Amino acid sequence: MKPPYYINENIIRLISAISVKLGEINILHLDKPSAVLRKQNQIRTIHASLQIEGNTLTESQITALLENKRIVGPKKDIIEVQNAINVYQALSKFDPYSEKSLLKAHQCLLEGLLDHSGSYRKQNVGIVKGKKIEHFAPGFDKVIYLMKDLFTYLKKDTEISLIKSCVFHYELEFIHPFIDGNGRMGRLWQTLILMKEYPIFEFIPFETIIKNRQDAYYLALSTSDKIGNSTPFIEFMLAVLLEALNELSITPQIKTEVDRLHYFIEKQIKPFSRKDYISVFKELSTATASRDLAKGVELGVLIKSGDKNKTLYFINESHN
């Protein structure tokens, strides 16, 4: 049974705007961000998605965990982040059209946090807001059938991916198939569905916009519940995706000399001078640029040739 929703003028307008923006991104070759930018967006995604669920770790703490450094923080929050890092680093290995893959992703996200992670719930649940129950999820005995129907819609319906990703996100929240982790799974799976057709969505942290608009996010879910279709939620999420695409930048927030070196090296093939390096990082002084390049030589990623004004740097291809 196809999930209930309808396409209104606002949805058509949003889809059109998103399509135009995706076209611009492809033309400008922004669909393959640098490794530095990919890393930063991954950190922002994990931070926002887990913060929505109450995780207290900061972006700097998540960065440290990503770099295998020890941090001080609540054990549960650290495990949540470590699990999310593992999942988001393996996004391409999950199949958005596979129910088995969904369960595997849930197992990875909730490992060490929830008994029977990777399994649908075996009890009835309700979502409480304040002192009242906001949403009664369908009975646990219906979950397996509802999820199979949802995947059938995802795989076989001819609706465009932009719509189907929003519908799947809403329906997963409505069905609430897991005891915990439904919110982060809904957002993760929307990303995977979009990635299948538009790879750029792997690098767009739209969760940060949801985090900043949590009240509107939950209102869209609640409104859709009350009217019995996901149209309000589709409108909200399409607006979020458009805003995220409009905020896309090709220049990462590079804070260290190592990040600058990696960003530059990814885009450089021929030998280059300090002047070439500064042309990319225009805010750098010549002294800072020299220190960066000296660091690159020290790390073995660069090979220096010549002296003073005739100095050139080569990428060390043998360096891993």
Image (cartoon, helix red, strand yellow):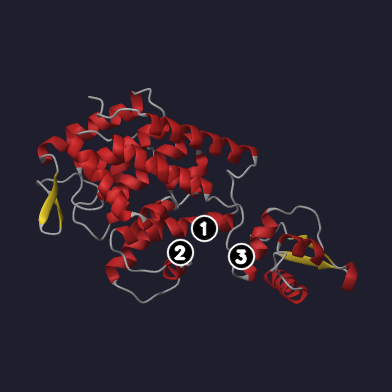
Mark before the other along the chain sequence, 1 or 3:
1
Q: Which residue is mark 3?
A: 259
| Count of picture labels | 3
Tell me residue 222's x, y (percent): 22, 45
CB of mark 2 within 8 Å of CB of mark 1?
yes
Which dot, 2 or 1, sits closer to the camera? Answer: 1
Find numbered disc 2 in the image and state the secondary structure of the residue it sits on. Answer: helix
User: How crowded is the residue under tag 1: few (<14 C-alpha within 10 Å), some, or many (20+)?
Assistant: some
Q: Which residue is mark 2?
A: 66
Question: In the image, what residue type sits under mark 2?
Answer: Leu
Mark before the other along the chain sequence, 3 or 2:
2
Q: For this view, does 43 lie left or right of residue 78?
A: right
Q: Which residue is mark 1?
A: 39
Mark before the other along the chain sequence, 2 or 1:
1
Name the quadrant containing residue 287: bottom right
CB of mark 3 within 8 Å of CB of mark 2?
no
Q: Residue at x 10, y 58 (%)?
A: 131
Quadrant showing the N terminus: top left
In the displayed structure, would residue 42 be above or below residue 98?
below
Quadrant showing the C terminus: bottom right
Question: In the image, what residue type sits under mark 3?
Answer: Asp
Tell me residue 53's x, y (percent): 28, 59
Which dot, 3 or 2, sits closer to the camera? Answer: 3
For marks 1 and 3, give the CA distance: 10 Å
Q: Is residue 99 visible?
A: no
Q: Residue at x 76, y 65 (%)?
A: 278
Question: In the image, what residue type sits under mark 1?
Answer: Lys
